[in-house]
Amino acid sequence: AQTVTQSQPEMSVQEAETVTLSCTYDTSENNYYLFWYKQPPSRQMILVIRQEAYKQQNATENRFSVNFQKAAKSFSLKISDSQLGDTAMYFCAFMKLLSGGSNYKLTFGKGTLLTVNP
Amino acid sequence: DSGVTQTPKHLITATGQRVTLRCSPRSGDLSVYWYQQSLDQGLQFLIQYYNGEERAKGNILERFSAQQFPDLHSELNLSSLELGDSALYFCASSVDPGRGNEQFFGPGTRLTVL
């Protein structure tokens, strides 16, 4: 079974600074997808960024970028120029093809609670 | 706003009761997923439907069932409720499960079992 590990339960950063959230995963699959989701106090799950395992280039989305190390099974999220609105729980998620067909499910890590301080 | 709607927003009920949670996917999305978020278990995949058919099952209890209707909305039925079923239940939808498309989440239904 796939597992996703986020080793930092909580982190904090000063506004305008950069912070990196760690994520490692365990899989024997070669093709899969990785995601970072953000869950602010409203509880809404919001997609932050996505990475396809077959792509070597790291995904970027404005102030958010990832460092994808496939051999090391590592997928960290870097947030640059942190803003107060970035305060949220961040979940790393792994998506693989389920056996028997073209079906996918997300396996989530436990989350990292990020607080951006003014 | 993800375009996925869930009702009700909050639900308070007693042990032993049965409830139904409803989800409407984004326009054009054929696949619906249900997830449970609890303090002790985290976010867990429960079940997936695609165009009316069950496609995958996760950690879904036998007391729980789901279905997807011809208009593509989905319902999650929870019966013989226990205190431990208290959680936030999310519905998500995607266009094509075969292409690893992003799943867009609804706002969730918070279930409290007293």
Image (cartoon, helix red, strand yellow):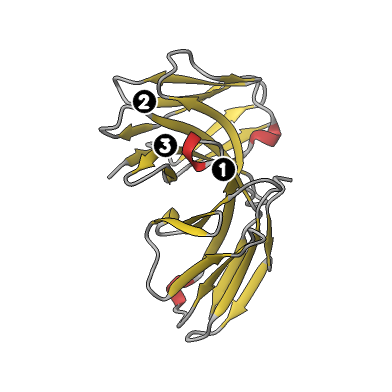
Three-letter code for the amino acid on which mark 2 is drawn: Ser
Q: Which residue is mark 3?
A: A8
Q: Residue drawn 47% across and 13% down?
A: A57
Vertical arrangement, residue B50 with respect to residue A16, above or below: below
- Disc 1 with disc 3 on a shared chain: no
Q: Which residue is mark 2?
A: A74
Of labels 2 and 1, the one closer to you: 1
Residue A38 horizontal/vertical position (percent): 58, 39
Q: Residue drawn 41% across and 24% down?
A: A53
Residue B74 horizontal/vertical position (percent): 60, 63
Neighbours of disc 2 within 10 Å: few (<14), some (14-19), many (20+): some
User: Residue A28, located in which quarter of the rendered image?
Assistant: top left
Q: Which residue is mark 1?
A: B103
Viewport quadrant of the N terminus of chain A: top left
Observer able to see residue B112: yes
Q: CA distance from mark 2 to mark 1?
A: 22 Å
- For residue A82, which numbered disc appears in the image? none
Q: Residue drawn 48% across and 80% down?
A: B79
Q: Secondary structure at mark 3?
A: loop
Residue A34 horizontal/vertical position (percent): 45, 31
**Horizontal side of residue A79 vs A66, given as left or right:** right
Q: Nearer the viewer, residue A10 or A45?
A: A45
